[in-house]
Image (cartoon, rainbow, N blue to C red):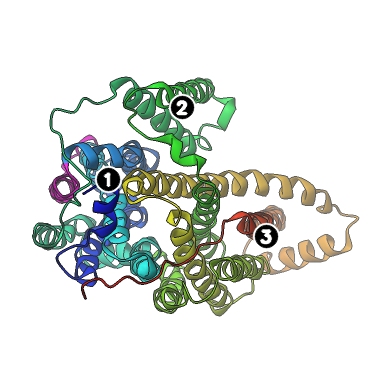
Amino acid sequence: MSDGALHQEWHPRHSPWLIAVGVMLATFMEVLDTSIANIALPHIGGNLSSTPEEATWVLTSYLVANAIVLPTTGWLANHFGRKRVFISCIVLFTAASALCGLAWSLPTLILARILQGLGGGAMVPIAQSIMLESFPRQKRGAAMAIFAQGVVVAPILGPTLGGWITDSYSWRWIFYINLPVGFLAVVMAKWLVEDPPYIRSDLKATIDYIGFGLLAVWLATLQVLLDKGQEADWFGAEWVRWFAVVSALAFIGFVWREFTAEHPLVDLRVFKNRNFTIGLILMTTLAAILYGTTAQIPLFLQTLMGYPALQSGYALSPRGIAAFFTTALVGRLVGKIRSRWLLCLGFTLLAVSSFMLAQVNLQVGQINVVWPSIVNGIAISFIFVPLTTVTMSQLDQRQLGNATGLYNLMRNLGGSLGIAFVTTMLARGAQTHQALMVGNLSPSNPAFAQRLAAAKHLLAHHSDPATATHQAYAAVYALLDQQAHLWAFVDNFFLFGALAVVTMPLIFLFKRVTQPAKLPTRTH
């Protein structure tokens, strides 16, 4: 029997729905850890005697290690066996989680997070490829709906869950909760996951060390740049300029190596597939908006509206709930309604939610943030499921392992780009608006003179006239600074909406996905 016939006829022994439950345990656990530690950073820094800037390496170290492993997923699965790699990743991730909880110093915690990132990097794309291969083509939309409920909902719920655990118990428990989940995930993976016959593990296979080295340098320098660039004033710092040059050269070298090597680490020829390339661009855009908005809403609520950290996390919870329930509906629609129209609706709702958030001011209530978040969650569901399905639709099953690694890499990099954009534009935008508005703080401006006089009159009851005047100026300037930051938030929300609109024409470049006729296969 030919390899082609073999892989066309292969079906897992167990029900694909049962397999989905098993692999999603590991997926949800890993994706949750990309955001659950964010809100606990002040507690981690205080407990381990480190500055806030040093504590952020807890996040950066994880993202760097995660990014390096993601593109190598296909190679690892093909040469060591997908089941063996998947279980090894879960074991490493779970053991590293225990070490994170036991960490006695910041360097120990960073080392544990690196190990956690290495274990988690290949876990999600392998889980995605297992689900895509376990379900027949006509049911892949439903499979990706289940996958989306973990990948989309987990990072949204992460800050809320992390805040509750940290406030109620200790930051160490945000890592300890992985232990029972990891143990159960290993048991289910050993029972349910199997290697398709077209994956032939070869423990003697040689790795492309040059390609891997270039890949590691490129992604490590790029991730550090995105995470730390704003703190260092971007290209104003010499190390940033060096990192940018090294990252660019390593990227060029990596691409050249992978196209010329006899046995490349990452098969970049998959980019010749139009649906896959367009899908990666749209996924990067979606991730940038998703993670950027997730980072920006809590900042707005905490810094300008005075919300406590946990309460700001609750404001995002409706988005996760909306995404969870809508995803189940979208999974049923994929295959019945053209993916193009589902994607158009999703990106339209994504733009609408961003434009709704661009209407915020300092007098809004929490409901003014909750409703756009709900629309945002619905939009993400209408995008993620059909986008993943149509992106992978033209690929052979043999290509799925490599393709899912690249797909999840761009999701992570898109998220890093979105967060870097938010942190940079908030700082720069606030400065710009402040410079534009400060000219209005002039005695010739009736509004300023009236507000200053009112502040002086109020403060004069509690101090002498000179002190009252100084405090009045400080109070008016603080209000100006607050307004400048508000406009920076509004600009960012508007730009996210514009980005969603600008990328929509790419949807019409997808090749139409035709559903294959149902073959008489055994019932799962």
Please give the residue where the numbered disc 3 appears in the rendered image: 501
Using the image as rendered, state which of residue 126 and residue 269 is in the foreground. Answer: 269
Apparent side of residue 500 relative to residue 7 in the rendered image (left or right): right
Q: Do the residues labelled 2 and 1 touch (CB within 8 Å)?
A: no
Is 274 covered by the magenta stretch? no
State the CA–CA distance, disc 1 to disc 3.
32 Å
Q: Residues within 10 Å of mark 2 (few under 14, many from 20)?
A: some
Q: Residue 122 carries which label?
A: 1
Q: What stretch is highlighted in magenta?
A: 81-108
Displayed quadrant of residue 472: bottom right
Residue 270's label in the rendered image is none
- At mark 3, the secondary structure is helix
Q: In this view, does 365 lie above or below 78?
A: below
> In the image, what residue occupies the spot 13% across and 32% down?
203
Whether tag 1 and tag 3 are in contact, CB under 8 A, the answer is no
- The image shows residue 117, relative to residue 283, as above or below, that is above
Of pointers 2 and 1, the one earlier in the residue sequence: 1
* Label pair 3/2, CB-CB below 8 angstroms: no
What residue did someone put label 2 on? 255
Residue at x 28%, y 49% (from the top left corner): 44
Question: Disc 3 or disc 2, which is closer to the eye?
Answer: 2
Q: Give the amino acid at mark 3.
A: Val
Query: What is the three-letter code of the residue carrying label 2?
Result: Val
Task: Please name whichever residue, 25 or 280, is drawn nearer the observer in this view of the structure.
Answer: 280
Q: Which of marks 3 and 2 is nearer the N terminus?
A: 2
Indicate the quadrant containing the C terminus: top left, top right, bottom left or bottom right: bottom left
In the image, 321: left or right of 29? right
SS at mark 2?
A: helix
- Of callouts 1 and 3, which one flags the residue occurring earlier in the amino acid sequence? 1
Is residue 106 highlighted in magenta?
Answer: yes
